[in-house]
């Protein structure tokens, strides 16, 4: 367990006035020529300050640093050419266009314009010299360039090539590259040298990274001969320098959050563990070594007088619920209440069921608080929680509405955190604070992420990993089949159910419509009942009343239902060990982690289980890759790694759907080689350059930093 970080608090308390030139706060209108209209357009690109302009990086470069002879041009090449006009003519073949033939003594080239003005044509008279730029292509009359950029060269003037590669910036309608180039030039000329450097050589040198000023100058205006491919891949040291500082800023801000949390007091939940022991003894199985270890890590945290912030990562089926129960019992034994929050009604109901089964024999009452309770049960549940009869509250996010009051809340458990997003997690921390005390927090996720990434994006959390499945689990066999082989799949369901097992049949979202999804599931359930008259088929979906849902799930759990047709509501958490067959329709539409979650519903008992992923052809490249990944591995960490590779961290961590800001420049996947150095750099700064920490965080997270404000 990490100890409190000394000195961190004071490092963050630097008054604003300590900065000289704060280009992060300097409006973009400080750049000459930016009036209200341009300002609005730039705002659409997210550019509001001078710093934003400097951090708005090119995504591509053009090489205009050399003049090329026409004779040496090859199709597909972008080039600067200086040539004389031979003739200019308007032609009407197909589309009206202006066709200009130019030559430079080494060959000739056609310029083609579909949009042009009369004046334009007038100017392009025979003998005039042009400097032009564009991509040469094979045309009907030899090499041609469609819509080249060009300028007329005056009599006697000698055209020069550019001194730098030409940056191409992300743009928006009505905002041209030329404006962006001018703008960045002004920002570079006027402000670059005022940008303070906050990373000491001691950090930069070993990584062979340039200073911030060097990096920005290079990225915006690379010298001739700069490695364009490397630059366009975003892996040039100049770009890495920027990405590194951004990731470092993010990391530091999470550390600050952590430090702030640790300034808060929390109740010491240091019960002797009698209740946990009693629970473990009452179970038909022994906890795995990994479960024991994590239970221990949590217990140690709970005994501290400041709030635990611990993330438990464990693959589906690794037994996170038991670990959560043990934590709750520690809180309860110490005289406090615990709350368990689940992302869906179904899962909340199931948790209540499990927790009641485990805790009732110990004389502990659990209340369910979900959004769909009727008024009377809701009042009763609220009273139980408020008056402290209910030592445990289980629910959806309804748990954290204002009217919910706890008598004495000591611990919050958030299950399947990836469904909530970082922001909600942070908001939760405010709940239940009393007498200046905050509750401890335990976060559980089945979407494990690689360690270095976890250290960076969860730097405010301690991480425990349940890296072991309960004994006797056999990996689920996964097959991928086209929709056309449905009859075989139905036969397989029949065989499994007649052999005493049970099966799921999941119909995911077909269109972006819950109603349609429901329709499909309803139709499928009807068709399957008909095809399988000897089986009891039931349907469960999100529109059912919680009670109906609970009834169906209970019937399935008890074996009264053989085949459960479902929408993706069963994605997370549902636990019925006798179910050994998972059928997923339209699997090509689901994400990798969702598929892995669904598959995790089977393979929970000692029986060999199988998962059939049905797809509708044709398969996209990405869908094929996902299905292949599912077929070839059962390991949640490996799945997460590939998911990360395919989709990028923003989506994997659930930040995109909750609309949280992504990195500007850094890309956790592309820049992952830097991750291991972030921690060390943070340590160097905190220890030896504490005054640099706040400015770095402010530079990159600015006022948008929601993290520090909780
Ligand atoms: P998840 O980590 O996906 O939340 P669960 O907590 O739902 O997993 O556990 C999956 C199943 O494994 C449950 O039926 C649970 O009772 C069972 N289980 C948990 N721990 C063990 C264990 N140590 N030995 C055997 N079965 C276990
Ligand atoms: Mg679970």
Image: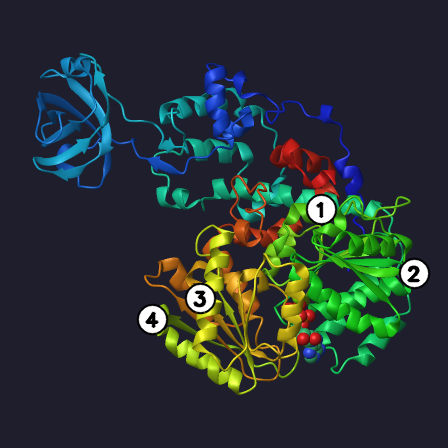
* 3D distance between C-alphas at marks 3 and 1: 36 Å
Q: Is residue 597 visible?
A: yes
Q: Earlier in the sequence, mark 3 or mark 1?
A: 1
Q: For this rendering, which residue is in front, 170 or 41?
A: 41
Give the image location of residue 286, x and y in percent.
75, 81
Which residue is disc 4 drawn over? 484
Which mark, by number, is residue 426? 1
Q: Earlier in the sequence, mark 4 or mark 1?
A: 1
Instruction: Name the element at disc 2.
Output: loop
* 3D distance between C-alphas at marks 2 and 4: 59 Å
Q: Is residue 468 visible?
A: no
Q: Is residue 545 depicted above or below 496 in this figure?
A: above
Which mark lies nearer to you, 4 or 1? Answer: 4
Q: Earlier in the sequence, mark 3 or mark 4?
A: 4
* 3D distance between C-alphas at marks 2 and 3: 48 Å
Q: Earlier in the sequence, mark 2 or mark 3?
A: 2
Q: For this rendering, which residue is in front, 544 or 601?
A: 544
Q: Are marks 3 and 1 in contact (CB under 8 Å)?
A: no
Which residue is disc 3 drawn over? 585
Q: Earlier in the sequence, mark 2 or mark 4?
A: 2
Which residue is disc 2 drawn over? 335
């Amino acid at each position: 367990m990490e100890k409190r970080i000394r000195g961190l608090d004071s490092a963050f308390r630097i008054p604003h006035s300590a900065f000289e030139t704060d280009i992060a706060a300097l409006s973009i209108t400080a750049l000459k020529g930016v009036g209200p209209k341009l300002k609005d357009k730039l705002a659409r690109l997210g550019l509001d300050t001078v710093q934003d302009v400097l951090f708005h990086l090119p995504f591509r470069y053009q090489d205009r640093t050399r003049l090329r002879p026409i004779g040496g041009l090859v199709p597909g090449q972008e080039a600067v050419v200086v040539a004389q006009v031979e003739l200019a003519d308007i032609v009407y073949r197909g589309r009206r266009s202006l066709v200009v033939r130019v030559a430079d003594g080494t060959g000739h080239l056609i310029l083609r314009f579909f949009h042009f003005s009369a004046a334009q044509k007038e100017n392009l008279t025979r003998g005039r010299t042009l400097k032009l730029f564009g991509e040469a292509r094979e045309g009907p009359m030899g090499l041609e360039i469609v819509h080249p950029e060009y300028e007329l060269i005056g009599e006697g003037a000698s055209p020069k090539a550019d001194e730098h590669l030409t940056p191409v910036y992300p743009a928006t309608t009505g905002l041209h590259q030329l404006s962006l180039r001018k703008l960045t030039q002004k920002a570079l000329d006027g402000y670059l040298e005022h940008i303070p450097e906050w990373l000491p050589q001691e950090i930069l040198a070993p990584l062979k990274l340039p200073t911030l000023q060097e990096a920005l100058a290079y990225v915006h205006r690379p010298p001739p001969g700069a490695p364009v491919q490397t630059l366009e891949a975003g892996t040039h040291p100049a770009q890495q320098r920027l990405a590194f500082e951004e990731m470092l800023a993010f990391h530091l801000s999470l550390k600050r959050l952590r430090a702030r949390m640790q300034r808060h007091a929390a109740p010491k939940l240091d019960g002797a563990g009698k209740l946990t022991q009693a629970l473990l003894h009452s179970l038909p199985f022994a906890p795995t070594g990994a479960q024991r270890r994590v239970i221990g890590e949590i217990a140690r945290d709970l005994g501290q007088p400041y709030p635990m912030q611990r993330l438990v990562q464990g693959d589906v089926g690794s037994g996170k619920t038991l670990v959560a129960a043990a934590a709750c019992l520690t809180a309860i034994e110490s005289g406090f209440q615990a709350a368990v929050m689940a992302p869906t009604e179904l899962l909340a109901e199931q948790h209540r069921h499990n927790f009641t089964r485990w805790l009732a024999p110990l004389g502990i009452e659990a209340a369910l608080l979900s959004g769909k309770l009727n008024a009377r049960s809701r009042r009763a549940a609220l009273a139980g929680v408020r008056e402290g009869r209910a030592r445990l509250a289980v629910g959806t996010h309804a748990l954290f509405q204002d009217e919910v009051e706890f008598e004495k809340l000591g611990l919050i458990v958030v299950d399947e955190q990836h469904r909530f997003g970082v922001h909600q997690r942070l908001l939760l921390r405010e709940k239940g604070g009393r007498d200046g005390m905050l509750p401890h927090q335990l976060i559980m996720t089945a979407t494990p992420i690689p360690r270095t990434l976890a250290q960076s994006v969860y730097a405010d959390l301690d991480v425990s990993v349940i890296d072991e499945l309960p004994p006797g689990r056999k990996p689920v066999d996964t097959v991928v089949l086209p929709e056309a082989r449905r009859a075989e799949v139905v036969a397989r369901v029949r065989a499994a159910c007649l052999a005493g097992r049970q099966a799921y049949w999941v119909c995911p979202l077909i269109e972006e419509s819950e109603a349609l999804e429901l329709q499909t599931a309803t139709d499928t359930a009807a068709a399957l009942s008909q095809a399988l008259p000897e089986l009891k088929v039931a349907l469960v979906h999100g529109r059912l009343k919680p009670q109906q849902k609970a009834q169906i799930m209970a019937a399935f759990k008890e074996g009264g239902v053989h085949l459960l047709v479902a929408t993706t509501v069963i994605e997370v958490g549902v636990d019925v060990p006798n179910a050994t067959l998972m059928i997923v329709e339209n699997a090509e539409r689901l994400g990798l982690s969702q598929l892995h979650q669904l598959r995790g519903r089977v393979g929970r008992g000692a029986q060999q289980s199988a998962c059939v992923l049905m797809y509708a052809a044709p398969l996209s490249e990405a869908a094929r890759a996902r299905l292949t990944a599912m077929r070839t591995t059962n390991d949640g960490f490996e799945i997460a790694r590939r998911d990360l590779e395919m989709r990028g961290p923003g989506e994997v961590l659930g930040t995109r759907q909750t609309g949280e800001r992504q990195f500007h420049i850094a890309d956790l996947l592309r820049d992952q080689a830097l991750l291991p150095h972030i921690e060390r750099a943070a340590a160097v700064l905190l220890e030896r350059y504490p005054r640099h920490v706040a400015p770095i965080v402010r530079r990159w997270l600015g006022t948008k930093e929601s993290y520090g404000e909780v």
